[in-house]
Amino acid sequence: MSLLGKLEAHLEIKAPPEKFHEIFTHKPHHVSSITPDKIHGCDLHDGEWGTVGSIICWTYFHDGKKKIGKKIVEAIDFGKHLIKFKVIEGDVMEEYKSFSITIQLTPKENGEGSIAHWLLEYEKISEEVAHPETLLTFILDISKDIDAHLTE
């Protein structure tokens, strides 16, 4: 069996793609105030918000434990409302050789809201490691909280 994997999900949200994308590019440090039960902090370790190569450290509560994840921004496409993070340190790296998270927002055809497409790409360190379904669910729950905040 392959240790490489992909998980993806689509989520309909009410927020326009520009607003949702801006949270993850220029304002990820606001997520902890939007969803404090899940995200405890987000700090810029290197670079500037909204730029490729920036390093961001997240502290979060997942699967009953406080965790840390340091990510580098690998790609940003403002026209396509896309951002890709590569995990470089933290709890996820205990079970995965590589792990990246991409979100792309697409406006809905009727012009009201967006489709958030989340993609997790990873390589497990062994066959015993589970696929990160709970992490994808966690990300979707955060997305719902952000959407509710943006459309209040």
Image (cartoon, helix red, strand yellow):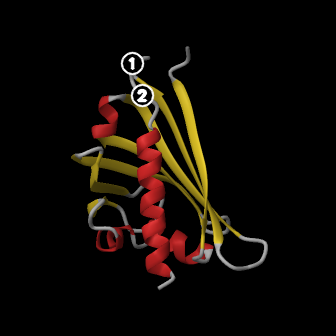
x and y, in percent, of residue 45 in the image? 27, 58
**What quarter of the picture does the N terminus occupy?**
top right
Read off the residue under disc 2. 130
Residue shown at 36% from the left, 62% from the top? 47
Residue 23: quadrant of the picture:
bottom left
Query: Total number of numbered labels?
Result: 2
* Residue at the extreme bottom of the image, as rendered: 152
Q: Could you tell whether 95 is left or right of 143 in the image?
A: left
Q: Nearer the viewer, residue 100 or 2?
A: 2
Q: Could you tell whether 114 is left or right of 30 in the image?
A: right
x and y, in percent, of residue 152 in the image? 47, 85
Q: Vertical placement of 116 versus 150: above or below?
A: above
Q: Vertical placement of 39 versus 92: above or below?
A: below
Q: Nearer the viewer, residue 48 or 110?
A: 110
Q: Is residue 53 at least partly visible in the picture?
A: yes
* Residue at the extreme right of the image, as rendered: 109
Residue shown at 65% from the left, 75% from the top? 113
Numbered tag placed on residue 38 in the rendering: none
Read off the residue under disc 1. 128
Q: Nearer the viewer, residue 78 or 53?
A: 78
